[in-house]
Image (cartoon, helix red, strand yellow):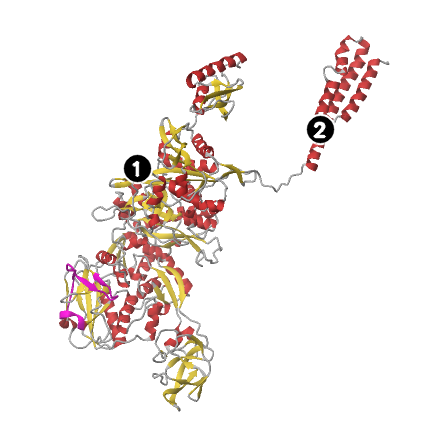
Amino acid sequence: MKVPLKWLHDYVDITLPPRDLAHRLTMAGSEVSEILSTSREWDKISVAQVVDVSPHPNADRLHLATVDLDGERITVVCGAPNVAPGQKVAFARLGAELIDGHSGQPTILKAARIRGVESAGMICSEKELGLSDYHEGILVLPEDAPMGTPLGDYLGDTVLDLDITPNRPDCLSMLGIAREVAALTGQTVREPPLDYAEEGRPAKERVKIEIADRDLCPRYCATLIDGVRIGPSPPWLQERLLAAGLRPISNVVDATNYAMLDVGQPLHAFDFSRIGGRKIIVRRTRPGETITTLDGSVRPLAPDMLVIADAEEAVAVGGVMGGAASEVSEGTTTILLEAANFNPTSLRRTSAALKLRTDASLRFDKGLSPELAMVGVRRATRLILELAGGRAAPGVIDVYPGKQRVTRITVTQERLRKVLGVRLPVSQVRHALVSLGFGCRWLPPDRYVVRVPYWRTDIRIPDDVAEELARIIGYDELPTTTLAGVIPAATPQPARQLRERVRDILATAGMQEVITYSLTDTESLAKVLSPDELAAHPPLRVANPMSRQQEYLRTTLRASLLETLAANLHHRQARMVALFETARTYLPRPDDLPLEAERLVGVVSGARPDRWGHPSEAPIDLFDAKAYMDFLLERLSLAPTYEEADDFALLPGRSAEVRQNGQRLGVLGQVHPRVAAAFDIQQDVFLFELDLEALLPHTGKPRRHQPLSRFPAVEEDIAVVVDDGVTATQVGAIIESSSLVQRATLFDVYTGPPVPSGKKSLAFSVAYQSFEHTLTDAEVQRERRRILERLSRQVGAELRG
Amino acid sequence: MDLPLLQELDDIQAKANADLAAADDEAALESWRVAHLGRRSRLNLILRGLASLPLDERRPVGAAANRLHQQLEEALTQREVALHEEAVTTTIETGRLDVTLPGRPIAVGRLHPVTQTMRDILGAFEAMGFQVVEGPEVEWDYYNFEAVRIPKDHPARDMWDTLWVDYRKDGEYPMLLRTHTSPMQIRVMEQSQPPVRIVSPGKCYRHEATDPTHEWMLTQVEGLAVDEGISMASLKGTLFEFAKRIFGPERRVRFRCDYFPFVEPGAEMSIDCFLCGGQGCRSCANTGWLEILGCGMVHPEVLAKVGYDAERYTGFAFGLGVERIAMLRHAIDDIRLFYANDLRFLEQF
């Protein structure tokens, strides 16, 4: 809502500089987002008075006009037909920058000889000043324009651009803002002038108005004005409309727009000669009905929309837009002026269905008071008479089936104290409310009866009144305390705790966390999921996506991570990248919200860093990626097992399923080169994925302390040759099954001569230790023989020579 | 008395001291020690043979031998120390390092700046007794809108441009991507009785074109406290405390009237612009104040809807954007950087 201060001044005295006024309004709920100025440079142009007009000696259509610039007199040649002595005008001296009246291009005013007469200056038209396209005559300023004043100072204005919240449709008007300003600065509101002369046959004898669907139209007011002359509005009004952000059209339309901005009531002017049967019916649409609206579109109307119809057809979509057929045009002489009130819910649906949001609909859908219709119609009628001449038929036709009682709210002092945290003095409460136009009656010992002014449709309950008090007194004036009372009992949040630990552990390990978008497209998902997997969890679609790339709720994080990796590789060169994300995937469930399953995905690629942190010659491999997984699971006190996996996105033979106690936790592996290529990644990528919910039951218990033996450990190596198919984990487990073995640590894996092909050598460092005594050599050797026997028996291992 | 053993001790001493002066590394010192103080050294033999000496010799020889033993041990220690110092001096002189060289790289991982800021925000509220609860990102219209007083066809719906899930029931879309974390207020209150004191973090979504200050995916923290005796005053105090914890103890705050359908009175909190010191700059749109969050007293109809006694209990609620806080803290001027995940950006935090 743009509020030119000169316009606002019609209704309230402005006692603060614009910045301070803006601050007060902002603090009280109507945020001023910008303070604009309509003033232009207009260098060397000032207000002057025409003191003499005489004919040009050599040209019939030209005049010689003498202007007074507060003492200084200059005579210039003037071609305007409307120039006359006594006028206040905008006078440009030589060197002023103007718009050329013919070419429309900016030009600098130079001295000229016109038909033999020297002319050193110019009386300007609106077009020359850049105010409008009007060039048929000079701009005539109001009589009280101060002579000699720079035009910029006189015509310019300061405009506050306000963000009005949806609960305050009353503030979508100069009068509404004036009420706020009055309350906030201790001023009084001047009521808008609503009176005008009436003559002829009473309006209600000439047109019949009927509301057929009273639920959708609580009130319909109308006046009739005969003998109007359609033409442009005067400059002052055009300027105000422009400053408020509306384009001037013609005097009658401008008057309705002006009245809407002035008092907040949307209006519509019909050409009465186009209203069939001299009858207005406010009704729901008929099946198959259409209307051509003012903007020229033919719009099919749905059932349950409300139209304004004449005897035959719809002439307007109620509260949204008028019809083209009954539009005011140049030949219009009689106006039927409408100011109605519409059901906000129905109106909003209609406006949404027609995809038509107008200044009118945006006001009606927030719930205007029906009382406002009478103010609006009288204000606009008066303006039309002022701007377009004509005669108003006596009386306002007022069909008002939805009249409501004045809202009265009983507010206890106790409630105000509860909400605001302070006991306000009665005088302060009364003063604040009265300044806003409320009535306030104090009923001791504890009650106020508050009468709500009609324009405040947002005030319904005592707490609404509390807000009024708070914003007028100032939120910052209310006391500030800490939260007292009992701290509620805590419920455990294991899933969140696990996620946060996982994040910490992986960051500690050197991985970078990323957060990627939850929405994706099916192509991305299909790159990492098999058709079966996609079919098992068909992703939920967004009905109104912003783009095709953000259409589906992801069922996996893999694609997002690979896309992020790919996007970073070009500036990483070969440097190692290790990324992870913990986020939700959305797995649909029939007729229910999706299952939001928390997943962890990590991707690793690039080369190991050298001493300088630069990529070395050694590209990372599966075990670099596994290191993160091992570290994570070890820190979470899990002891997982790995088995070869079969996964659509991973390379067979280089992928593993991670299990704990037989339960699947996730996968780890090299991304299949076909999948990597689909993301434009040409280098090896390793990926791991964990289901955090599957992890949850295995975590959270504190670790048990392992006692330390007082007796020394004996370390010995065991190197065995086994078949390729035997895993290091199997061999290690057999060694560690000995009660004297504290731990067995793998330190070498070797294939190649002299180890026969199809076999490999595994070397373990084995620590023997007892809790009872220092082990003797003989004991260690005996245990070692037993271990070797078991290895031989269980996995066919031979001691490597 | 002129005893040959005493003379020999003098000779040992002279030789030992001369040898020691010549010993210039650890190995030489060790062989010197074996030669002069070892078990088979002449001095040790003399000491061990003292018992067999005649009584009148035993005393002076014993005293001299012990003195010599002690002197040699001390000399050895001194020589060791001297050699050590010499070595250090040599190291300093010849082993000079360019100390400006970088340390050997260790892998440094980082949390996303949104995660870091989120933790600080939640930590500030947890310290004030708020408990963190999380809820679904895909929500019912009921929780996102209806229950928080934004019925269908309410103009306030314009404040939240919504992404709807393509699932129809009775001709409507009942499922949506939550536009704010406010639905958790309702879910929590439906399942518990006052006192309530929670913060609910999470992702939210808006049908919104992106630009430097708008992103369609955003992270919010919602807060709710309901109990007897909660007022605007406690709301202001709690959020002031939060602002100080996040932005520094010297921060000032201001509250202005604002509108959200689920609170009454409604407010917006700003902090004094620490970027320009309140002088007015681009970040604070020349006002000297930075908008931080929306808040207010929970609307009594919201409380009544979940079955609370709205006469007895009052509450406050607030909601804030984590990205906005992170942008202010780190002087980030484009919100889109967060989810573009360019490592050159992420590695700065």
**Which quarter of the rendered picture does the N terminus of chain A lie within?**
bottom left
Tell me if A437 is positioned left or right of A477 in this view. left
Tell me: residue B139, above or below residue A726. Answer: below
For disc 2, the neighbor class at 10 Å (few under 14, some 14 to 19, many from 20) is few
Tell me which residue sits at (50%, 42%) in the image.
A574
Q: Give the CA distance from mark 1 to mark 2.
A: 77 Å
Q: Position of residue A762 (x, y in %)?
A: 48, 23
Amino acid, disc 2:
Val
Which of the two marks, 1 or 2, is nearer to us in this view? 1
What secondary structure is marked by label 1?
A: helix
Stretch of the chain drawn in magenta: A273-299
What secondary structure is marked by label 2?
A: helix
Tell me: residue A572, above or below residue A373. Answer: above
| Chain for disc number 1 | A
Which of the two residues, A148 or B22, is positioned nearer the viewer here?
Answer: B22
| Chain for disc number 2 | B
Which of the two residues, B90 or A647, is positioned nearer the viewer here?
Answer: A647
Tell me where residue A132 sits by quadrant: bottom left
Q: Position of residue A277 (x, y in %)?
A: 13, 70
Q: Which residue is mark 1?
A: A532
Q: Position of residue A91 (x, y in %)?
A: 42, 80
Q: Which residue is mark 2?
A: B81
Tell me where residue B40 sits by quadrant: top right
